[in-house]
Image: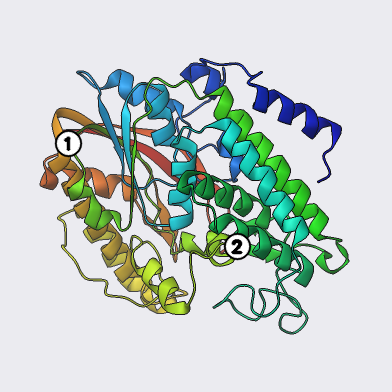
Amino acid sequence: MFWSQRQRLMYTQVSSGAVIHSLRFKDWTGDRSIESVGTTAGLGPLPFQRWRSFKEAFAPEIVERAVRETPGRIRHIADPCGGSGTTALAAQFLGVKPTTIEVNPYLADLIEAKLTMYQFEELTVTFRAICKEVNDLRPPSGVLFPGTPATFVEPGLNGQFLFSRSVAERIAMYRDAIRQLKSEQIQRLLIVLLGSVLIPVSNVVVSGKGRRYRGSWQSRPVSERMVDELFRQRFLDAIYDLRAYQTRACREFAVLRGDCRELISKIEMVDLAVFSPPYPNSFDYTDVYNLELWALGYLRNSMENTELRKATLRSHVQIHRDMGGRRYSSSALTRTLHELEKVRSSLWNRHIPDMVCAYVSDMGDMMAALSSRLRPGGRVYMVVGDSRYGGVDVPVAKILAQIARHVDLSLLKAESCRSMRASPQQGGKQELPETLLVFSK
C-alpha cells in the first residue's frame, strides 16, 4: 500500500497517540468571530464537519449559547433533525447527553460515527487490513450498485455517467470488504469515510440544492488510485479528529433512525432542543445524498427510495403524497395561502400551496411533540428559513411563532441570522431571511 510522506507522518502521530488531548469546546470550534448564529455557510471547515461537506450545518456556537441561556441544569438535549450532527457533538463537548433523530440512514451513520469512542489501535489495524484485502482482490463483475439508474456507472446513458467503471469497481470492493467487518462501530465509521470520497471521484459536483456535471468532465482523469489515496486521507483526517477530541465532557448519546414526526414522542424528557429543520423550499434533501445512499448500499430499489422520501418532512413536492394534516391557526399562514392561491396556476408546480400548508402542519406537530417532552422552563432553539413562490413570501418564522401558543410554547425572541439567496426564478438576490426562534415551555 502506497503512503505519501505526509500520510506516514500523520499515521505515526495518530497511531502512537502523539496528538493533543483534553481539548475544550472552544478548542474544537476555534476562536472565531461570527456575525450571526445562522448556518456555517462562508465559515471555514471545522474538525468533524470536514468529513463530509454539509452546507446547511449551523454554527455550533448556537448550542453553547442555548445551554448558557436556558435556566436550570442542562442534562439532556434533543435534535429532531440531526443533519451533520452539530448539536449532538457540541452537546458532548458541553457535558450534556444528546439525543438525535435522523431519517437519512447515511447521515444517521455519519452522526453516530462522530459521537462514538474508538480503540484506535484496532481501528488502524482494521483499516490497513481492508486496504490490503482490496488490493489483493480482482474487480467484481456484474451489477455493482443494484437499483441505480443507467447513468450511475460507465457506459451510462447517452454518453453520461457518474462513475467510470474502474472507479465504481474500486468503490464496490471497499464497500463489500467493510460490510463484512464484525465491529459495527468500525464498519459504520469506514463506510461513512468511504462515502466522503464519492463526490470527488465522480463526474458531478453538488451545486446548490442538487448535482450537476463538472465542466469538461469527459477529459478529467480519475482512476482507482485516486479512490485509494482519498480514502486514506479521509481516514487520517477522521482519526486525527477523533483522537484529538476524544476527551469530551460527556460520552453518552442516542441516535434514533427514522421519521422525526413519529420518534420525538419516544425520547426521554429533555431540558433543551436545538435544531434546524428543512426549509419549505420544495426541494427533497434526499437528492443531495443519492450517491452515498445508493453506492454504499443504504438503498437497494426504488421502493426503498420512495419510502425514505415519504419519511421526510413535507417541505418539497418531488413525490406525490398526502398533504393533509392539522391546520394550525395563524393569520400569517392564512394570508400566505390566500396569496399563493391567486398565483397557483402560474407556479412551476401547482401543489406548492398544499406543500406549504402541509409543512406548517408537520412543524406544528413537531413543536407539539417537543413541548410534551420538554421539562418546565426548558427551551427550544430553532433556526428556520423563509421561502418565496411566484413573488409570494412565505414568512416561516412568523407563522411558527404564531402557532407556538397552540402547542404550549411561548416565544421568547426571534432574531435575524442572515439572508439566503432566492432561486433564479425569484431574482436570485440575498433577501430570504433565516431566523433564530427561541421558545420556552
Q: Dot 2: few (<14), some (14–19), or many (≥20) neighbours within 10 Å?
A: some
Pointer 2: what residue?
176
Q: Which residue is drawn at 57% across and 60% down?
A: 292
Give x and y (percent) for residue 180.
55, 58
Q: Nearer the viewer, residue 262 or 387?
A: 262
Q: Nearer the viewer, residue 337 or 342?
A: 337
Left or right: 326, with 394 as reference point: left
Q: Which residue is drawn at 49% across and 38% down?
A: 114
Residue 176 image-quadrant placement? bottom right
Q: Is mark 2 on a helix, strand or loop?
A: helix
Q: Which of marks 1 and 2 is nearer the N terminus?
A: 2
Task: Identify which amino acid the numbered label 1 is placed on.
Answer: Met
Q: Nearer the viewer, residue 10 or 78?
A: 10
Q: Which residue is drawn at 25% across and 25% down?
A: 75
Pointer 1: what residue?
269
Q: Which of 124 and 280 is in front in this view?
A: 124
Q: In this view, does 90 lie above or below 181?
A: above
C-alpha separation, residue under disc 1 versus residue under disc 2 = 39 Å
Q: Is residue 87 above or below residue 360?
A: above
Give the quadrant of the C terminus: top left
Q: What element carries label 1?
A: loop
Give x and y (percent) for residue 118.
50, 33
Give x and y (percent) for residue 62.
41, 28
User: What colour scheme does the image use?
Assistant: rainbow
